[in-house]
Image (spheres, rainbow, N blue to C red):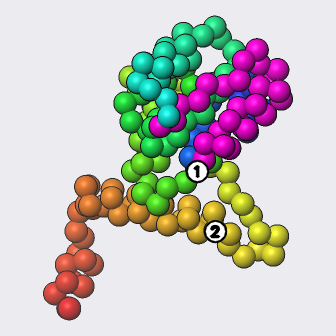
Amino acid sequence: ALDRVAGSGERVLIFLDDLALQARLAGLIQRRYRLTAPPMIISGSVDGASRQSRVDRFQSAPDGFDAMILSPRAGGIGLTLTRANHVVHLSRWWNPAVEDQCTGRAMRIGQTRPVTVHIPLALLPDGRRSFDQNLHALLDRKRQLMRDALLPPAADDQDREALFAA
């Protein structure tokens, strides 16, 4: 996915919780895509002024491929990163609202392009469902439960009959 994003000169937000992996991934991305500097990282160890400075640099940088690596907890709230139109979730959360807040960093007022969300999933060669697939299905079910609670579908005749039969 990153090869396609880089090839089209677009920008990506990568959400990853592990601090050591963030630094390693930044180095890998810099080498693979021949960037002059490693992608900026926003994690809990970055103070507020530095965090805003990194956001401003990402938002105002010249056109072309760029990536920013963020911790879901530190980068999931309060940031506007509309120069990115791709979001990659490498660290998944049990609470889909946290993941949706992270995606929302790119889907804010000022976004002019469609945002593509990438969720890499491990697949088992024997056809059994992997942990990643099971977690993805669980998060989808939780999202549907939240939608149904906030916007419940109108009851139809079948629902009423089932209720009275019970």
Residue at 78 percent across and 34 percent down: it is 28
Q: Quadrant of residue 149?
A: bottom left
Residue 92, image x and y in percent? Answer: 55, 54
Marks counted in the figure total 2
Res 32 seen here: yes
Q: Furthest-left residue in view? A: 164
Name the front one of labels 1 and 2: 1
Residue 52, image x and y in percent? Answer: 44, 19
Q: Secondary structure at mark 1?
A: loop
The one of 128 and 158 positioned closer to us in this rendering:
128
Res 88 seen here: no
The one of 144 and 138 positioned closer to us in this rendering:
138
Q: Is residue 121 left or right of residue 147?
A: right
Residue 107, image x and y in percent? Answer: 45, 31
Alpha-carbon span between mark 1 and mark 2: 13 Å
Residue 22 on the magenta span: yes
Sequence-wise, which precedes: disc 1 or disc 2? 1
Mark 1 belongs to which amino acid? Ser
Residue at 24 percent across and 85 percent down: it is 162
Residue 102 is labelled as none
The magenta segment: 18-44
- CB atoms of marks 1 and 2 within 8 Å: no
Q: Secondary structure at mark 2?
A: helix
Give the labeled residue for mark 1: 91
Q: From what the image shows, is residue 152 above or below residue 6?
A: below
Q: From what the image shows, is residue 165 above or below residue 44?
A: below
In the picture, the quarter occupied by the C terminus is bottom left
Give the labeled residue for mark 2: 131
Residue 40, image x and y in percent? Answer: 61, 25
Q: Quadrant of residue 63?
A: top right
Q: Is residue 145 left or right of residue 9?
A: left
